[in-house]
Each structure stands twice: as structure tokens, then as C-alpha cells.
Amino acid sequence: MGGSIIKRDEDDIRYLNDIRTLLMRLKGDLTFIIVTGGGRTARDYIHLGRDLGADETTLDSMGIAATRLNSWLIISLLGEGCYPAPFHSIEEALNGAAGFRFVVGGGTHPGHTTDAVSAMIAERWKADLFINLTAVNGAYTSDPNVDENAKKIDEMSSSGLISLVSSTEKKAGSHSVMDPTAAEVIHRARIRTAILDGRDLGSLADCIEERPFDGTRILPE
Ligand code: UTP
């Protein structure tokens, strides 16, 4: 869950309540490991820290702290069926998922984003599906917020995804539809992946329940 969809300062309470309703109505045999991004809070701290001269690893640590703040929001939302604190490692997430229906956490180590954490968890957990909930309704040929000729991609191969995100800068707070490390993990581990607008809960339900959905499907190859 991208941080920018959890806390957008626009209908946040309604959105969070709606996502709880959706998760609670889904079949009880599904287990979710939810990885929260840091959104604007992460970026604000990273920019301020960079202006103060902090090194990139320190800035990453600020970003990780912001991702965990958002984890606490989702943990509060999910209540009893949820592991009671944000996981701090991939192993803790997997252990939590053995006993709880929901496990929530954010970043783990400096040097990547929560997309990479999610992909590595999906690899180790042999997850059925990795869903990347972001602020746009899928991957585009270029950034649709900047380029009016950007075209939505409904389906692409995992190597196509690697090429699409290969030019992403390796810096704290840098942003693309998928972190390049995550794209590499998706490719090598052949993880079924979907990218969709996290605020579109109809599409999210369609995706989880295996119906056609508005978003991008990444096909393992
Ligand atoms: P995010 O995962 O939130 O970045 O991590 P994002 O994907 O760009 O943002 P949203 O939430 O989808 O809008 C924020 C920052 O925290 C650090 C990185 O600097 C990253 O850019 N971070 C995060 C790490 O260093 N390690 C992690 O495991 C996670």
C-alpha cells in the first residue's frame, strides 16, 4: 500500500473504513502481508534532512520510520486478527503470517523502497499474488502526471517492467511505479503481480477475487 493512498488528506477515514470492510468480507482462508509505504511524510523528512546535509542511508532510515507510522494506522484499523506491531524484517513477517490473518509492516533496510520489501516477502512466502496499490491505475509508458501522451499498459512481461523502471534514480525518496529492485525480484521469482489504484476498492476486490480488473498485470516469464 503506497503511503500516498493511506494518507492523502482527502476522505482518509472513509477510505480506511472501506478497506477494512473489504478485507473483512474476503474469504477467511486468505492471509495478507500488508507493506505500507511512507508517502508524503517520508518525502517531507527526506527533503528536509537532505537540505541539512544528511547522508542517503540516514535519509532512508527516516523514510523507514515514516513507513512504520503508516503501518500503525493499518494495524489499528484491522484490530484483533492482525499481528500486533509492524514487522521489522522479512522473517518476522513470515512468522507473523503463520499465526495471524493480517501482518503489517513497512521498510526493513536502507537502500530500497517498500516495493522491494513486498517483492522479497512475496518471493520467500511463495505468495499467490503481489498487489502493488499505488496512486495511479496501473503502469504507464511514462509518468502520466507529467506526460499527457503516456499510455496505460494493461499487461506486460516482468522483463518489460524491468526496462520500464530501469532509469529510476538510486536515492532516498526516489519514485517510480515500481522500485527497480522489486522488478528484478518479481522477474527472477516469477511472482504474479498486479499494479492498481489503491483507492479504487472495486478494482482491488476484482483483482483479489480473480476477476478482470482495472490495472496492470505483470506476467511471469
Ligand atoms: P516508500 O516505500 O514509501 O517509497 O519508502 P515510495 O514507494 O516512493 O513511496 P509511496 O509510499 O509509494 O508514495 C520511502 C522511502 O523510505 C526509504 C527509501 O528512502 C524510500 O524512498 N526506505 C523504505 C528504505 O530505505 N528501505 C525500505 O525498506 C523502505
Image (cartoon, rainbow, N blue to C red):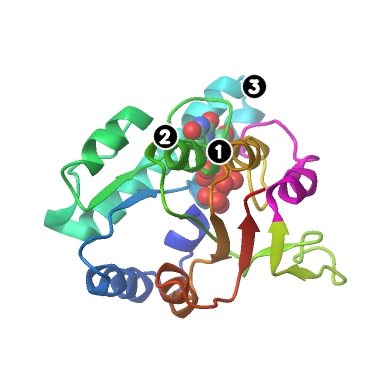
For mark 2, does the 10 Å Cα neighbourhood hold few (<14), some (14 to 19), or many (20 or more) residues? few
Give SS at disc 1: helix
Residue nearest the viewer, comparing 137 with 153: 153
Magenta stretch?
157-173
Q: Quadrant of residue 137?
A: bottom right
Q: Earlier in the sequence, mark 1 or mark 2?
A: 2
Residue nearest the viewer, comparing 186 with 76: 186
Residue that badge 3 annotates = 53
Q: Residue at 11% of width from left, 55% of height from top? A: 80
Relative horizontal placement of residue 19, taking residue 48 as reference (left or right): left
Residue that badge 1 annotates = 189
Relative horizontal placement of residue 50, taking residue 189 as reference (left or right): right
Query: In the rendered structure, which amino acid carries the disc numbered 3?
Result: Gly
What distance separates the C-alpha of mark 1 from that of mark 3?
38 Å
What distance separates the C-alpha of mark 3 from that of mark 2?
36 Å
For mark 1, does the 10 Å Cα neighbourhood hold few (<14), some (14 to 19), or many (20 or more) residues? some
The picture places residue 121, in percent across and down from the top left corner, at 42, 38
| Residue 141 circle label | none
Give SS at disc 2: helix
- Discs 3/2, front: 2
Quarter holding the N terminus?
bottom left
Give SS at disc 3: loop
Q: Earlier in the sequence, mark 1 or mark 3?
A: 3
How many marks do you count on the picture? 3
Query: In the rendered structure, which amino acid carries the disc numbered 1?
Result: Ala
Q: Residue at 61% of width from left, 36% of height from top? A: 188
* Residue that lies at the very extreme toward the left in this rendered image: 80
The picture places residue 102, in percent across and down from the top left corner, at 25, 52
The picture places residue 98, in percent across and down from the top left corner, at 20, 41
| Residue 124 circle label | 2
